[in-house]
Image: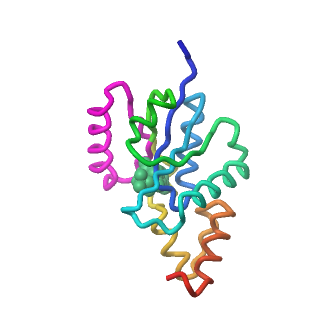
Amino acid sequence: MNSEKIVVYPGTFDPITNGHLDILRRGIDLFDRIVICIAANPAKAPMFPAAERLEMIQEALKEKGLNGQVKVETFDGLIVDYAQELGAIALIRGLRAVSDFEYEFQMALMNRHLNSHLHTVYLMPKDEYTYLSSSIIKNVARHGGDIKRFVPAGVERRLIAKYNNPEVE
Ligand code: ADP
């Protein structure tokens, strides 16, 4: 039996923030290998196409020296099936405030119903990232606010470029 503990970190990552990276670091402390799975998630009308979200994550991993244990992929479909194909034992997710809880609870129970062998592990970020989300970052960047403390350098650069382009709304 393979004793390597692989976990999947699924999400939209539109774009990746330091909050996502905080959860990732905690996951690295606990498991052998993490696969970040980027959900296409058209229902959320993402700002960045999945391929660009993947590029931004890879740049951030390189910048932070985390690329050894972490792989990044895009996926479309049921995360439980994808996790099983990868031989993962669990999904990791971040829990910020109580407001995350209801949705996460629903997802975790549905995923358990779909695959009872796959666990969901929740990790809490450092308190300064508790109120951080990809949406709030996009809003602040849209109005020219400083987002440096909250996102990797490549993400900041791309957001500034997007909002300086008059074709972007
Ligand atoms: P999804 O659409 O699946 O919620 P997100 O990219 O918004 O995708 O979030 C992916 C995961 O990362 C979720 O578990 C979310 O709670 C977590 N997450 C997002 N931002 C933060 C943050 N600032 N701190 C901790 N966890 C976070």
* Residue at figure coordinates x 67%, y 48% from the top left: 61
Residue 97 among those drawn in magenta: yes
Above or below: residue 82 compared with residue 166: above
Q: List x then y, in percent, for residue 80.
A: 39, 36
Q: List x then y, in percent, for residue 27.
A: 54, 37
Residues shaded magenta = 93-122
* Residue at figure coordinates x 46%, y 55% from the top left: 40
User: Which one is in front, 68 or 45?
Assistant: 45
Above or below: residue 142 compared with residue 45: below
Farthest residue to the top: give it: 1
Q: List x then y, in percent, for residue 168.
A: 54, 81
Q: Would you say 24 lies left or right of 109 here?
A: right
Q: Would you say 54 lies left or right of 10 here?
A: right
Above or below: residue 9 compared with residue 157: above
* Residue at figure coordinates x 56%, y 29% from the top left: 31
User: Which one is in front, 167 or 69?
Assistant: 167
User: Which one is in front, 53 or 17?
Assistant: 53
Q: List x then y, in percent, for residue 112.
A: 30, 32
Residue 106 among those drawn in magenta: yes
Q: Would you say 36 lies left or right of 83 here?
A: right
Farthest residue to the bottom: give it: 166
* Residue at figure coordinates x 54%, y 58% from the top left: 50
Q: Quadrant of residue 146?
A: bottom right
Numbered marks: total: 0
Q: How is the image coloured?
A: rainbow
